[in-house]
Image: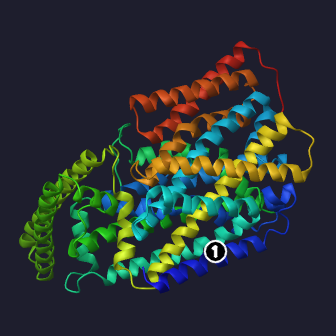
Amino acid sequence: MHLLDWLIVGAYLAWLIRDGLRRTHSANEIDGYLLAKRSLPWWAAGLSVMATQLSAITLVGTTGQGYSDGMRFIQFYFGLPIAMVILSVTVVPFFYRAKVYTAYEFLERRFDAKVRALGTLLFLGGRSLSSGVVIAAPAVILSVVLGWNLSLTVLAIGVPTVLYTMFGGVQAVAWTDVKQMVVIVVGVLAAVVVLVLGLPSEVGLADSLHLAGAVGRLKTLDFSFNLTERYTVWSGTLAGLFLMLSYFGCDQSQVQRYLTAKSIDESRRSLLMSAYYKIPLQALILLTGVLVFAFYVFTQPPMLFNPVHHARVESSNRAGDYRALDRRFGEIFEERRKAAHAYAEASGRDDAAAARGARAAFATANSEMAATRAEAAALVREVTGDRQYEDVNYVFPTFVTTHLPMGLVGLMIAAIFAAAMSSAAGEMNSLATATVIDIYRRHIRTGASDAHYLAVSKAATSFWGLVACVFALYAARAGSLIEVVNMVGSLFYGTLLGAFVLAIATRRANGTGTFVGMLAGFAAVIYAAWTGSVSYLWYNVVGTVVVVAVGLLVSAVTSPRPSSR
């Protein structure tokens, strides 16, 4: 990075933090610190809802997913619009009228304290680990840009984020999210323009996309019904519906966002923003990854995108084998590039037979390049002992830092840093809220002042920030970050959704039945994950169904008393 890029990054982050803290005029009161006194306009709350999801994970993980696997991941979001409509009609008015700080307060009002406590613990477990993934994304970028150790880069992101969150409050976080969304969209569009302009003039965008399609990068819909396949129309629409209902309806990091809106109608409108805009935005980011693949068809990519592991192998006794693989990779790349040019030339003169032959040669060379990369990755695992080595998260950062023009690199890095800090800050704020409201104030000290609870909130933020930083070290090496964060959430979300279904949709369930059902649902999800019997999206269905079935059965056996909702 050039000095200009660093100046842009520094100036943007300084302005972001300063402006965020300037808006914390009501953060010395518990209602203002945690819910912004329910004063945010619907569009700000809606952008904050979207920004909490659209973290650096999206820019790093989703673009890498598009590069390596194409557009299939978009099916993951097919259940989102349906979920937003359902939640707008059901959960939003329940929570808003109840005047709760957290979603789990509602569980105690409907059932009892033990159900609320279990729901809170499930949220704290899942969201703290997910926060680690959010921190891991920019840490990966810093390790590429600066050549720093990953542990150091995790601390470089985590510590400032914890400090900012401690002094900020939800209002500062929400307004920061608004700026973050604008900068991210501008940055992605700028990257797309650079990618398109970087294609050879004699090939063009259409031919490049046809070549990407020849190796499956543009395949979007898969109608096969296979419970072990991660991304199909059915897993996205059915299992994804359960995940989205759980995430937006039961996760405090999302509930807290739309509870900051001025009214029920504005809360609903803030949620429906995601229904309208989330899928097109995710498609754009996935397409950016596909365009990175198309760009590297004509510009040789590194065999492996993680320079740290590359250096370790180069200095090992297997360096000769690694260099031989690198030479072979370069030779195959030239074959693939020539086949791509041959396809463009054949298409230009409408020679269908020659075009088909060139496409086939391109696909063959691409498979051989992938196989060579796989051999190199296996060598890295052998030399470093890192059995979970993947470099998909390094693809987009490598492109940004090596091919974007000066100034634009700084803008993209600033966007990714802002996304990570804002999302992590929001999640830590929600973790602190649940810790203080649902655990500390409910069970440990019930009658303290606002000042005392604010101090405990800041201490809780520090604790959860430490947990997130520790997990970030693992998450950065666990594969595609966008998949990791959703896998982690899916271990917990189905159980929480089942509890809220029992709370809202039926009067027959009681506290004992719901508590036992939640334990059974969580155990069923862990068993499904351990056996690998279904893809992770279906964990949400498994958890919800088991909680509802067991909860109703146990409630019937224990003769539940009628209770009002």
Residue 434 x %, y % = 74, 45
Instruction: Give above or below for 123 relative to 184.
Output: above
Mark 1, secondary structure of its residue: helix
**Residue indicated by mark 1:** 179
Instruction: Give above or below for 479 relative to 337.
Output: above
Q: Residue at x 76, y 53 (%)?
A: 458
Q: Residues within 10 Å of mark 1 (few under 14, many from 20)?
A: some
Residue 159 x %, y % = 62, 59
Using the rendered image of the protein, determine whether residue 89 is visible from the camera's viewpoint. no
Q: Is residue 480 left or right of residue 90?
A: left
Question: Residue 519, located in which quarter of the rendered image?
Answer: top right
Question: Residue 191, located in which quarter of the rendered image?
Answer: bottom left
Amino acid bearing label 1: Lys
- Coloring basis for residues: rainbow
State the residue in front, 78 or 151.
Answer: 151
Residue 368 x %, y % = 14, 57
Instruction: Give above or below for 400 relative to 530.
Output: below
Q: Residue at x 13, y 57 (%)?
A: 320
Q: Is residue 288 left or right of residue 49?
A: left
Q: Is residue 487 left or right of residue 455?
A: left
Quadrant containing the N terminus is: bottom left
Instruction: Give above or below for 183 relative to 48.
Output: below
Using the rendered image of the protein, determine whether residue 325 is visible from the camera's viewpoint. yes
State the residue in front, 450 or 546.
Answer: 450
Q: Residue at x 53, y 74 (%)?
A: 414
Count of picture labels = 1
Quadrant containing the C terminus is: top right
State the residue in front, 294 or 411.
Answer: 411
Residue 302 x %, y % = 25, 67
